Image (cartoon, rainbow, N blue to C red):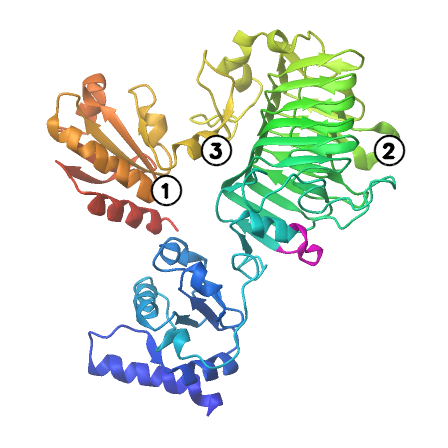
Amino acid sequence: MKAHLRMSLLLAGVVVLISDARVLAHTDLTVEQARDLIASTAGLVVVDVREPSEFCDARGHIPGALNYPLTSGVLQARYAELPMDRPILVVCRSGGRSSVAANFLDAKGFPEVYDMNGGMNAWLWDTVPCKYAGGSGTADDPYQIATAADLIALGETPEDYDKHFILTADIDLDPNLPGRKVFDRAVIASDTNDVEPGFQGTAFVGVFDGDDHTISNLTIVGVSHLGLFGAIETGVSISRLGLVAVDVNGTGTHVGALLGGGTTAVGDGSITASYSTGVVTGTALVGGVVGLQPRRSQITVSYSMATVRGSDYVGGLAGVNFGSLTNCYAGGHVTGSGHVGGLAGQNGCRNRGANDYGTITHCYSSCRVSADGQPTGGLVGLHDFGEVTASFWDIDTSGHTSSDGGQGLSTTEMQTASTFLEAGWDFVGETENGTEEIWWIDEGEDYPRLWWEREASEAGTVIELTAPDFDAQIAEGVVLVDFYATWCSFCDMQTPILDEVAERLGGQARVAKLDVDEARDIMQRYDITGVPTLILFRDGLVVERFVGLTDADTLVAAVLSVVESQV
């Protein structure tokens, strides 16, 4: 019976569809049929659409099931991650939500969908509990870290250091809060022996996706290899993570907000789109993001605004760089004795061989640099082995006119776009230096900032556009623009609706507004004869327009339809 179950179910579904065209394409199953389908079907994907608290409760879930909650919108936002070429079994608690989810997947074109009637309430066979806040630790279903307890549990489970993780919420580690503490070692991959030289412990070798969340108020008072991660090895990926208001204080070496350092076997790791603020203190190999940037590893599109204090090998971003720093910056205050730099205390090490070749490309420092010894520089203290390319430091704020690598400029020059464009930096709105849209600048007011910073700050908020920046703002992605006037009462009524739309979209698309009285040419270009008028753009082209007061549900549905069509 099992050998023919899947074909029988498909045939049954065909008969139903022929007899009643109103019925959707998925096939309803009893729990017994679902159990047999799981046992007999290679490649079957079980999608549990309950909320995480249900998925991870004492009852557990079907082994191998993926959690895509329906009610909170996760399935609707991430359904494209599911394979179209494999059968999908949808389950929930009692069968109601799984039916809705199955209909949704039908509508999205999934060809083989099954709905388990009766849900987990009727399931009598094996289940498994959740680890952390959910997930299974794979690339497709990473372990979910949602609380301080989850993060601490990860640190206490070295056997999981080669797994995939995703941060699903901001976490406050303030030691004054219940369940938190002042750590005496790194939270994850800590050094287990303060006496023996070098790193003694298990290094992290997995993937940690911050998913644009933050970990705040991390407080450590310890010795060496301190930071959120103590040490990493080959293949590590840490991304989209913010460490806010850290207080990391070590009496030894290898101290950073995010990472203390790497082991001798490290290679090919990456830290991407991450940042730190707060205070980092150590003796040697001390940096705002990493104490020792491991050999052949990369830090890209990241920054630190931390205050960094040490004695030797102290840098605003990295104490020592044995890998690559690309499209990064530091803007805090760096203090030390020797080998002190605004970005890196030392770049590369000739005596250690080719593996310790350091590169710094398209980076800058606006740090104040204080040191009572040498070598000290505005960007790099000692450039020993490697390359420093198209990188700069502010001679006014740093207090230093020299650096072992890089070019020193005045604050005015550092806040001028042409300085960086002429050096080949990739900025939003230009294509000569590339199309990755890495940097942007509020010229004359600020230094260059990473474009993802602006995108992150705008998520869930309404952006106020001006005529000069309008074209650049709508040129890429999905943007909903409210054309309004300050004298318009209906525009005033549209404002809180627009705020709600931005909050509900949560960064999936940008929401903006433009005062038509300050942008007459743009108003005429788009033939706007009344306000409020809302226009939905995709990559600079008009997709849809709404004239007059428009409700949030209509706008959100329209925006999401365009977003989903891009997947």
Residue 204, visible in the rendered structure: yes
Tell which of 70 and 25 is nearer to you: 70
In the picture, residue 346 is in which quadrant?
Answer: top right
Q: Secondary structure at mark 2?
A: helix
Tell which of 411 and 217 is nearer to you: 217
Residue 532, visible in the rendered structure: no
**Can you say whether 555 is above or below 107 in the image?**
above
- For marks 1 and 2, give the one nearer the viewer: 1
Lateral position of residue 253 relative to residue 534, left or right: right
Give the magenta range: 155-163
C-beta proximity under 8 Å, tags 2 and 3:
no
Mark 3 lies on residue:
452
- Name the amino acid type tagged 1: Gly
Q: Whole-percent x and y of residue 142?
A: 55, 56
Task: State the CA–CA distance, disc 2 to disc 3.
Answer: 36 Å
Q: Whole-percent x and y of residue 67?
A: 46, 62
Magenta stretch containing residue 95, yes or no? no
Q: Earlier in the sequence, mark 2 or mark 3?
A: 2
Q: Earlier in the sequence, mark 3 or mark 1?
A: 3
Would you call the spot at circle 1 few (<14 residues within 10 Å), some (14-19), or many (20 or more)?
Answer: some
Q: Any mark on residue 352, and which?
A: 2
Q: Any mark on residue 506, and which?
A: 1
Magenta stretch containing residue 158, yes or no? yes
